[in-house]
Amino acid sequence: MKKTARIAGVLCVTLGAPIAWSQELEPRAYSPAPIGTNFALAAYGHSTGEVLTDPAAPVQNIDAKLNLGVAGYGRTFGIAGHQASAVIVAPYVWGDVSGDVFEESRSVSRSGIGDLKLRVAANLIGGEALTFKDFVKRTPRPTLGVSLSVSAPTGQYDPDKLVNIGTNRWAFKPEIGLTVPRGPWMFDLFAGVWLFTDNPDFFGGVHREQDPMPTTQAHVSYTFKPQLWLAVDGTYYWGGETTGNGIPANDRKENARVGLTLSVPVVKGQSIKFNWSKGATARLGSNFTTYGVAWQYTWFDR
């Protein structure tokens, strides 16, 4: 019974973690667009490898195979003369996690609705609110923007189960982003920090807290023609140590990931993005690989 409870506690924190961090590589997140731009998206991601664990637990051979399906909608608009945007996405997660505890193998499977995500952004410098007609006449220049991402505790969660899809807490990420175009090249640099509310009903009746987690991103992309571009991506994040009932878990993160993103036009108004990422360095977890594909349909207000 104690062995089962131990791996239950370990696997309880793993199912959503790789999916969340793999989505942190987002090139051109602050690129300007004309106001009245609408876009619908559908995406799929598959992650395999190690996941976040309790380093004090005697767990070996951690392996996860996780899948993420996403449906979303976004729109650009103007605020005080600046271009802004809002995006909402609804995820569905399914997968398996396994590991060895005291030389005994354990595995769990789960599927269900994940936590709802919302991102609101505004370009403060170089991102004026322009109609489509005026936007195509503009000369591209550097932009500086800010955003707030919110993860709401709407996902499937049961504190009596060993593994959950949802996190049973809110998370917020304020971020600032700089985008610099140079001919066909584009350079992105983002810096933000994840802030977490407490989970008062973690597995086993534990009150779980998590420290803030600063994060940075850098991207270099090259545009071959409209909607056809390739980006080299990188992210680094640290901190985020958790505490259960006042006892630190000694699970501070200090991890880096690298990846590639390719956007390909399909027909007018539609494009497909392919992405790949993997762990580069990891103090704890993040040594996993992700493959993803996303379809996006874009249309403009008349």
Image: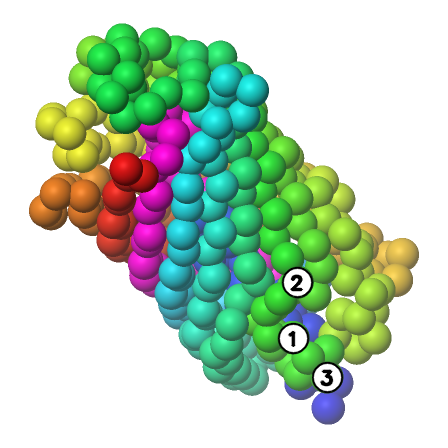
Identify which residue is drawn at 43% across, 74% down.
95
Q: Quadrant of the C terminus?
A: top left
Q: Quadrant of the N terminus?
A: bottom right
Q: Is residue 41 magenta?
A: yes
Identify which residue is drawn at 70% across, 43% down.
195
- Write the start and end of the magenta stretch as one range: 24-53
Q: Position of residue 248 (x, y in %)?
A: 81, 53
Question: Label 2, on which residue?
Answer: 153
- What amino acid is labelled 1 in the image? Tyr
Identify which residue is drawn at 41% across, 46% down.
74
How dense is the environment of label 1, judged by Cα within 10 Å: few (below 14), some, or many (20 and up)?
A: some
Q: Position of residue 91 (x, y in %)?
A: 46, 63
Label 2 to label 3, Cα distance in Å?
17 Å
Q: Position of residue 258 (x, y in %)?
A: 37, 38
Residue contact at pointers 2 and 1, CB within 8 angstroms = yes
Quarter of the rendering containing residue 181:
top left
Question: Label 1, on which residue?
Answer: 157
Q: Helix, strand or loop at disc 1?
A: loop
Extreme-bottom residue of the structure: 1
Question: Label 3, on which residue?
Answer: 160
Quarter of the rendering containing residue 7:
bottom right
Task: Please identify, in this view, whether the residue under mark 2 or under mark 3 is nearer the observer.
Answer: 2
Extreme-front residue of the structure: 302
- What amino acid is labelled 2 in the image? Pro
Q: Is residue 210 magenta?
A: no
Residue 216 located left or right of residue 292? right
